[in-house]
Image (spheres, helix red, strand yellow):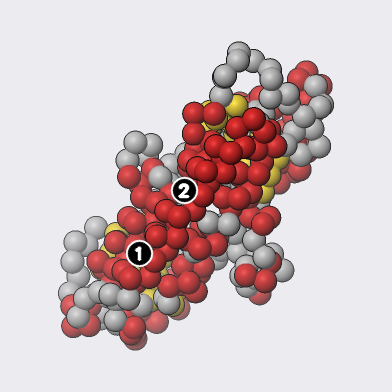
């Protein structure tokens, strides 16, 4: 976890002071050196990647949450608030993903262009699980078709900021949208390689339900939709019983969540006389390291799908053999 965290009240106060220092009007695209890229701040890496693809050399993107960072628990530091105040436009996911930053983002919206990229998605297509107390599941990027709908939001926002280059943003957005449609079709083909009876995805927290709905997997998370809720012993034992009874061959850790909970689940399954292997690590709420394939949205999706299919598309008999126990 990071140090130097601000309380919500302190963060808001800092944002207000910075607003007075920079002026409360929307930023002027003409400020700064001619041709200089626009300063964009994003929350999660998935958004950073879309903005970079749409904006090209016209934008300099700064993401607040890097690899391995859990957005459910992230709190803005003083440095983060300064970066937000210095941005010309801010993009975030919304749907309460950045829960601890909600008030800061709301305050920023009063004096700076600030966009929730999921606002364009029809609420009828969002998941609203009862256990999430009337809120929507924010993990929409696991349905590639839904995530494609964030692209027009970013195209429109950048075009308003920089109308002289609107045609460039539109062209890059259209190209990236076509790439995402091809990715969605590829995921469907790969998912079909897993026998229907083995399409059960067990992960550290309940982040993959959009993936399950879109691509035909039953999804079980040890923790809830938000990682702020800890999994208890009863949760581990309940899920272990399901895995052993149904002989699910593999379970998965997540890059932004400590693996100890999944290892505890694996041990609980073993105590029931069944060996389930850890099928690999999935990227859930954060991308991989910059400069790697998994450091992009498309690369992250491909990694996850290849990991899931590789671990589950095996003969049922193989489920009784623990492979690569980590």
Q: Quadrant of residue 96?
A: bottom right
Measure the C-alpha gap from mark 1 to mark 2: 17 Å
Q: Residues within 10 Å of mark 2 (few under 14, many from 20)?
A: few
| Element at label 1 | helix
Residue at 55%, 37% (x, y): give it. 168
Q: Nearer the viewer, residue 311 or 86?
A: 86
Q: How far across and down, in percent of the image, does residue 141 sit? A: 51, 57
Q: Nearer the viewer, residue 156 or 287?
A: 156
Residue at left 61%, top 44%? 154
Give percent across and percent down for residue 80. 61, 30
Residue 64: name its quadrant: top right
Q: Above or below — where is 148 with respect to 232?
A: above
Instruction: Note whether 102 is above or below 221 in the view shown.
Output: above
For image coordinates 68% across by 66% down, the residue present is 123
Q: Is residue 28 left or right of residue 197?
A: right
Q: Is residue 82 left or right of residue 211?
A: right
Lower position in the chain sequence, tag 1 or tag 2: 2
Q: Nearer the viewer, residue 76 or 21?
A: 21
The residue where tag 1 is placed is: 186
Visible in this render: residue 97? no
Helix, strand or loop at disc 2?
helix
**Position of residue 253 measured from the top left corner of the image (x, y, whole percent):** 36, 59
Where residue 216 sits: x, y (%)?
42, 77
Q: Which residue is mark 2?
A: 175
**Pick the front one: 213 or 102:** 213
Mark 1 closeness class: few <14, some 14–19, many ≥20 residues within 10 Å: few
Mark whose residue sits in front, 1 or 2: 2
């Amino acid at each position: 976890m990071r140090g130097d965290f601000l309380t919500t009240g302190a963060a808001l106060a800092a944002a207000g002071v910075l607003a007075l220092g920079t002026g409360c009007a929307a930023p002027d695209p003409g400020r700064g050196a001619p041709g200089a890229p626009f300063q964009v701040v994003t929350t999660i890496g998935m958004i950073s990647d879309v903005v970079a693809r749409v904006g090209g050399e016209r934008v300099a993107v700064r993401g607040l949450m890097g690899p391995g960072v859990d957005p459910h628990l992230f709190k803005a530091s003083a440095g983060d608030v300064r970066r937000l105040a210095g941005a010309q436009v801010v993009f975030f996911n919304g749907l309460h993903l950045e829960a601890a930053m909600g008030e800061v983002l709301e305050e920023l919206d009063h004096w700076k262009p600030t966009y929730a990229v999921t606002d364009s998605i029809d609420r009828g297509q969002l998941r609203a699980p009862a256990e999430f107390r009337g809120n929507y599941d924010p993990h929409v990027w696991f349905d590639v078709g839904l995530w494609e709908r964030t692209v027009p939001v970013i195209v429109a926002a950048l075009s308003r900021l920089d109308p002289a280059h609107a045609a460039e943003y539109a062209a890059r957005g259209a190209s990236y949208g076509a790439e995402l449609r091809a990715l969605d079709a590829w995921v469907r083909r790969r998912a079909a390689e897993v026998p229907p009876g083995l399409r059960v995805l067990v992960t550290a927290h309940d982040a993959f339900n959009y993936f399950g709905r879109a691509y035909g997997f039953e999804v079980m998370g040890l923790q809830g939709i938000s990682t702020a809720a800890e999994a208890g012993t009863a949760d581990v034992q309940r899920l272990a019983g399901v895995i052993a009874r149904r002989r699910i061959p593999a379970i998965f850790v997540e890059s932004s969540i400590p693996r100890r909970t999944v290892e505890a689940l694996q041990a609980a399954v073993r105590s029931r006389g069944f060996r389930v292997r850890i099928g690999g690590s999935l990227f859930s709420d954060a991308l991989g390291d910059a400069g790697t394939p998994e450091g992009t949205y498309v690369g992250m999706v491909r990694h996850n799908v290849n990991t899931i299919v590789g671990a589950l598309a095996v003969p049922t008999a193989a489920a009784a053999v623990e492979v690569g126990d980590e």
